[in-house]
Amino acid sequence: MTDNADKNLEQNVEDSDKAPVEPKGTEETLRGSEVIHRLPLKDPPALVVLLDESGRYISANKAALEFFECDLVGLLGKEVSDLTARDFSKQQRDKLLLCTTPCTVEIDFLILGKRKRLSLNVVPSTLSGKKFVCAIGHDISENKRIETEKKKLEVQVKQDKERKAIRKLAGSIAHKINNLLTVIQGYASLMLMNIDSSHPHFEKLKGIESLVKDGADFTKQLLSFAGDGEYEVKATDLNEIIDKTVEMFGHHKTEIRIHRIYQKDTWTVEVNHGQIARVLLSLYLNASEAMPGGGELYLRTENVTLDEDYVKPFDVKPGNYVMISVTDTGVGMDEPTRQRIFEPFFTTKVTAGAGLGLASAYGLIKSHGGIITVHSKKGEGTTFYMYLPASKEEVRKEQEPVGGVLKGTETVLLVDDDETVIVIAGEIMESMGYKVLLARSGKEAIEVYKKNKDRIDMVVLDMVMPEMSGGEAYDRIKEINPNIKALLASGYSMDGQGQQILERGCNGYIQKPFNIEQLSHKLREILDN
């Protein structure tokens, strides 16, 4: 075999799904030919066949034998047209056997009554003066394509289940932590009611409240990852979302040094907090996988104006945008990988992960009317650029209730399956002057309400409970009294289910953990209207 032929053959084998350039194998004397060729014992995904100048098979690897559904003895000596479909043309045959430079040809075969198609990279070669053809190919049959897509879908379904399981676990953990924080906050609130600022424990108790607030902020980040964050879109400062998400990520990846480069006075954007947080966390995790030994992560924001020429390929409107860039100093990507990085089933991982996935990140940014692109080179790191349209709306900060604790004398039915929460919340309400009836499940709530419906002025119920949810309990109570006033409380954030309960008439929502001022204002807001 000539040196050039050797190089051509090796290059094509390398290009066909990373087959080894210098395969290790046993030396086989090929039947029907004096040609001696080394074929790999560990076959690559691509199939490989050798044809002599008359078009007879003189060797094949395992993948080829699986395609032709026969063993080596059954294949050797057959002429190529023996296995092709009837519409195999002379032009295809000539291209396969008479080409003088590497080329590609697609051929239909009829194997045991089944029509199959191969895409073959053909390399003409010679050995000891004898010509032969090395053809390296992939099965592109329709049934093979369907089988491949089916496998991809199966992998996707498995990944989706894993993601849902992890998010459900994260949501459950956040819910439990919020219940514990509610109890801690409750005890602090009760003690603060009976002391003034001169008391030696006053500052300590205020410190506990501050720590509860920090814990609540952390669980909000956890709920965002779990997909249980708020569904509403509102005017937002992106720098704040980045700060919250990177704080969560930084606790997990201490070997990565994080640099934040923010433009001051960035324009506001109207986004869903939970969804953008999940996109950012996905990009951080993607960066960490590219830097297994640690590295640098640069997060940058900038106000930019995109003209029509720039936005036209992305089908968005020109105008003002806020850019977020996420840059890592990791291994980078080659161009074929970079071009496919946002494809739904594409992954460079050996095993499937449970992250959001870049295809989902792409979809979420698009759903916000934005753009996401990537720049990367092998060995030079990666940068993701996100552009979200600027808004004229102003960011509204959540205001703490003013005016202290508001008291009342009405009767409230409190429903919660967590014993510690229901006890402390009931004690807090009683300290504000309310008469409190307790129910520790949805079913018990209905029974208590039936017996006391003439004196119950309002219901405060947990959203997530076993056997009967807060939403179902609310609907059953509403059947008894269509005018019932109700406040929904939960350790989860307001999600689709909670929003639906509000749309069915529930009067308000309060996020656990809440302090005594927040609860008192919510109660009066509903009872006085």
Image (spheres, rainbow, N blue to C red):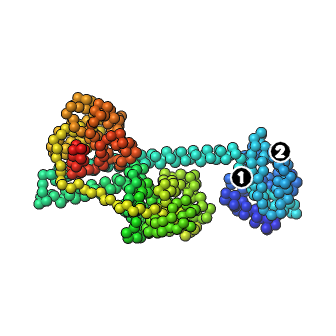
Label 1 vs label 2, nearer the camera? 2
Depth check, front residue: 509 or 447: 509
Question: Which residue is rendered at x = 75% and y = 41% of the image?
Answer: 114
Question: Which residue is rendered at x = 34% and y = 43% of the image?
Answer: 502
Residue 243, position in %: x, y?
A: 38, 63
Calculate the distance from the C-alpha at mark 1 to the C-alpha at mark 2.
Answer: 21 Å
Badge 1 is on which residue? 138
Question: Which residue is rendered at x = 56% and y = 63% of the image?
Answer: 312
Residue 279, position in %: x, y?
A: 46, 57
Q: Quadrant of residue 448?
A: top left
Horizontal side, residue 76 vs residue 353: left or right: right
Residue 314 vertical position relative to residue 416 in the rendered view, above or below: below
Q: Earlier in the sequence, mark 1 or mark 2?
A: 2
The quadrant in which the C terminus is found is: top left
Badge 2 is on which residue? 86
10 Å neighbourhood of mark 2: few (<14), some, or many (≥20)? Answer: few
Q: In the drawing, what numbered circle is on residue 91?
A: none
